Structure formats: C-alpha cells, structure tokens
Amino acid sequence: MVSIFKLEHIVKHYGGTLALDDVSLSITAGTSVALIGSSGSGKSTLLKVMLGLVATDGGTAQFENTVIAPQQSLALRQQMGYVIQEGGLFPHLTVSENIALMAEHLDWPKEKIRARLSELFALTRLPEHFAGRYPKELSGGQRQRVGLMRALMLRPKVLLLDEPLGALDPIIRADLQHDLKEIFQSLGATVVLVTHDISEAAFLAETLVLLHEGRIVQHGSLAELVRSPASPFVTRFVNAQRSPLESLQSPQSTI
C-alpha cells in the first residue's frame, strides 16, 4: 500500500511550548484519517505541517516521496484541498469568484472553470443560483459548502479539513456530516480531518489518530480505542465524550 504522507520524528515548538513531540505517521493513499484530541494536543499543527504551512523544528515530512519544504510548498499545495471553519471565504468576492480563485490564477480557460463550477455545485448540493451571492448572504452551512468547493476546484489528490463543522449548529452539522461522507466516498481521494468530536471522527474516517500533549498515543478504529486502549488517557478521552443517554445504558454497552 502506497503512503501519500510520511511523517518521521516531527518536532515543533511555538516559543517555549512543545506542540509536536517526535511524531511519526504514515497515511495510505485513498484512505480517510481523523486527527483527534483535546485542545492544544497538536492535531491542527500536524495538519498544517502536512500542508507546508508550518515549518518543523525537527524530523521530515513527505508528500508522495517529496519533502515538504518552503521551496516546494506552493506547488505541493495545488495538489491539496484545504478547508477550515466557516470556509475562510473572501468577503469581497462572490461565491463563484471564491471557488474559482486558484483556477483563475492558473489561467484555466473560462469554459473549463464554468464546467468545473457546475460539477461542484451538484456535488455539494448547493443550488447554482448562489453563484453570484457574497459570503455575508450565506448561512454557516452554505459557507462551509462553498469552502469545500473551493478546496476541490483543482481536483486535489488529498483533502485536509481543520474542524470544518465546529462552528455549526447540531442539525446543520449532522446534515453536512452525511453529505461529507458521501462526497468522500464518491471522490476516492485521501482525506485527513481534524476534529475534537470522536463520534464525528468515527463517522467520517476509517482510522482515528489520537494525540495528547503533542504525541500520538494511539491510532486505529473507534472499536480498538474503546476495547484496547493504549493508555488510561485513551479511556478518559473516549469516556468523556459519551452522551448523557449512553451513560444511562448498562456498563457492558460500548460507544
């Protein structure tokens, strides 16, 4: 199986704070992985290392056997789609202008851009009449769909999402979770997702990677984390996210 990302002994400091402490991780092409953990665990920093947005203080990060370094980062990022909370849209650009920004920069023909926009509106189930609207005229869920379309515009090999649904209300979040799962399956691309929500991680990803204080403490399926925790912290993290209704079930029940 081919690794699309290979991280070896990654170290990253922010001033006197150690954000990543000797992190090694290999991600197989075509799989979906969720980076989970408490706030400050290092999961977003690790995602940004993969994107080339954060320079490491030690170790090596590779994308398709190419070292992720400043001189290659711009070219590599054209093969990666990046989605953040609220979509990170430019307020002075329309929906279609936001989505097509990089394609315009790369001088795609206008017909090619129009065709790709139509594909993306259909894929994300956002009506095409939203194309001329501005971000302030959209709901949070709609902005997130536009951010996803922008990330997918160049047909990237990987899709990286940093807490993409964290700012949404529960009903919209649940709808988008189901849509994202369908989109991931239809694309067949590599997906790396950051979330603090273990249920969301298990729904959207095949493999969960749990970080704590800058280190990977366990990776595997949710069932493996529940039944074979690598440390007491894994059990505490999983149990802390049990819903009130689940806590009323019998001790033998699992998440």
Image (spheres, rainbow, N blue to C red):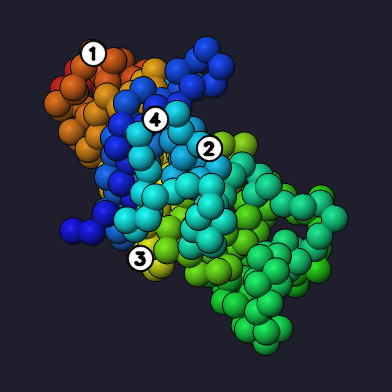
| x and y percentages locating residue 92 in the rendered image | 85, 55
When asked about the image quadrant of residue 230, the answer is top left
Closer to viewer: mark 3 or mark 4: 4
Measured in 3D between alpha carbons, the distance from the residue under mark 2 to the one under mark 3, in whole angstroms, is 27 Å
Circle 1 residues within 10 Å: few <14, some 14–19, many ≥20:
few
Is residue 111 rendered to the left or right of residue 45? right
Does the CB distance between marks 1 and 2 fall below 8 Å? no
Residue type marked 4: Gly
Residue 193: horizontal and vertical position, in percent? 43, 44
Question: What's under tag 1, amino acid-wise?
Answer: Pro
Task: State the SS at label 2.
Answer: loop
Which residue appears at 35% of the width and 34% of the height?
Answer: 59
Q: Which mark is residue 232?
A: 1
Residue 54 disc label: 2
Residue under label 3: 188
Marks 2 and 4, how far apart at CA: 12 Å
| Residue beneath the point at 42% across and 63% down | 157
Q: Which residue is labeled 4 in the image?
A: 58
What distance separates the C-alpha of mark 1 from that of mark 4? Answer: 28 Å
Q: In the picture, which quadrant includes the N terminus?
A: bottom left
Q: Is residue 97 left or right of residue 144?
A: right
